[in-house]
Image (cartoon, rainbow, N blue to C red):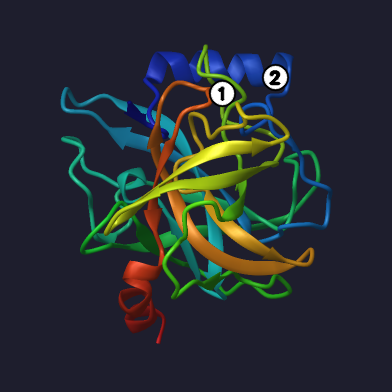
Amino acid sequence: MRTRALLSATLFALAAAVVTAAPASAVANGSDVPQGTFKFAAKLTMTDIPKPDGTKYNSACSGSLIAKKWIITAGHCFHDAARNPVSGPVPYPTSVLLGTTTVAKPGVTRNVVTVYQSPSNDIAIAELDKPVYGIEPLSISRKAPVVGQKVTLAGWGSLTSVDPTPGTKLQQGVMKVATVDAQYTGVKGFAPTSTTSACTYDSGAPYFVPSGKSGGRLVSIESDGPDCPHDQAETTARADVVADWIASHLG
């Protein structure tokens, strides 16, 4: 098991070269998200992340818009050099792309200014430097996930765990809830295949119940899982258990 946001400086440089040569997709064994759909899905790009030896590296995560100035993602996407989760001013430059399903077409770009870590599970909410207009945010579910429930995953991660690269095209998959505990839920691939799964750089990607092409209800957040693609359970952080905490920050 490993968190979905990790990449060394050397591998990130290699990944950048690979992206230039052959654009990568996201969500292993998923399908393309049509342009104009799931505009709330966020692509996070982090630069100059500190390491204990003083060097720096770049990485990426996924997320989603939950209010005009707020996104939600995995807590482990924001940390110090020792990988301790960080709350407060953003620990390194983080840009957010919204409103598009491919980096080849312009979307809405914002920067993260402040981060707040969930008090109970691997979730963080992040304040943006400017409001986002014209995109319907996801609402936060206040109902516990149910085993057998179908949810949609939309992420900007890699297609494979072998030499992974941050995605250039938003991908989706239908997942089924397999387990539920007090803070987390396990989900497994359902469609297009049983091996549809989150991958590297999908950390923070939303699992949600869609509402048309625009919004939806957020059920959980991608946290961790086996190397992709796979047919095993992904660990996702429940949104409903921190709904009140989120509301207290959003006002």
Q: Position of residue 212 (x, y in %)?
A: 78, 67
Circle 2 is placed at which residue position? 20
Please rate how many residues cluster around mark 2, counting C-alpha atoms within 10 Å: few if below 14, some from 14 to 19, many from 20. Answer: few
Residue in the foreground of this view, choosing between 88 and 26? 26
Residue type pointed to by label 2: Thr
In the rendered image, the residue lying farthest to the bottom is 251
Q: Quadrant of the C terminus?
A: bottom left
Circle 1 is placed at which residue position? 165
Residue type pointed to by label 1: Thr
In the displayed structure, does residue 93 sit left or right of residue 196?
left
Q: Which mark is residue 140?
A: none
Q: Position of residue 202 (x, y in %)?
A: 51, 38
Residue 106 higher or lower than 128, as above or below:
above
Residue in the foreground of this view, choosing between 86 and 63? 63
Residue drawn at x 17%, y 22% is 53
Quarter assignment of residue 234 = top left
Q: Quadrant of the N terminus?
A: top left
Q: How many marks?
A: 2
Residue in the foreground of this view, choosing between 166 and 213? 213
Mark 1 lies on a secondary structure that is loop
Please rate how many residues cluster around mark 1, counting C-alpha atoms within 10 Å: few if below 14, some from 14 to 19, many from 20. Answer: many
Residue drawn at x 75%, y 52% is 100
In the displayed structure, does residue 213 sit left or right of residue 27?
right
Decide which of tag 1 and tag 2 comes sooner along the chain: 2
Mark 2 lies on a secondary structure that is helix
Q: Position of residue 152 (x, y in %)?
A: 63, 51
Q: Position of residue 16 (x, y in %)?
A: 58, 21
Residue drawn at x 75%, y 46% is 101
In the rendered image, the residue lying farthest to the front is 148
* Dots 1, 2 in contact, CB < 8 A: no
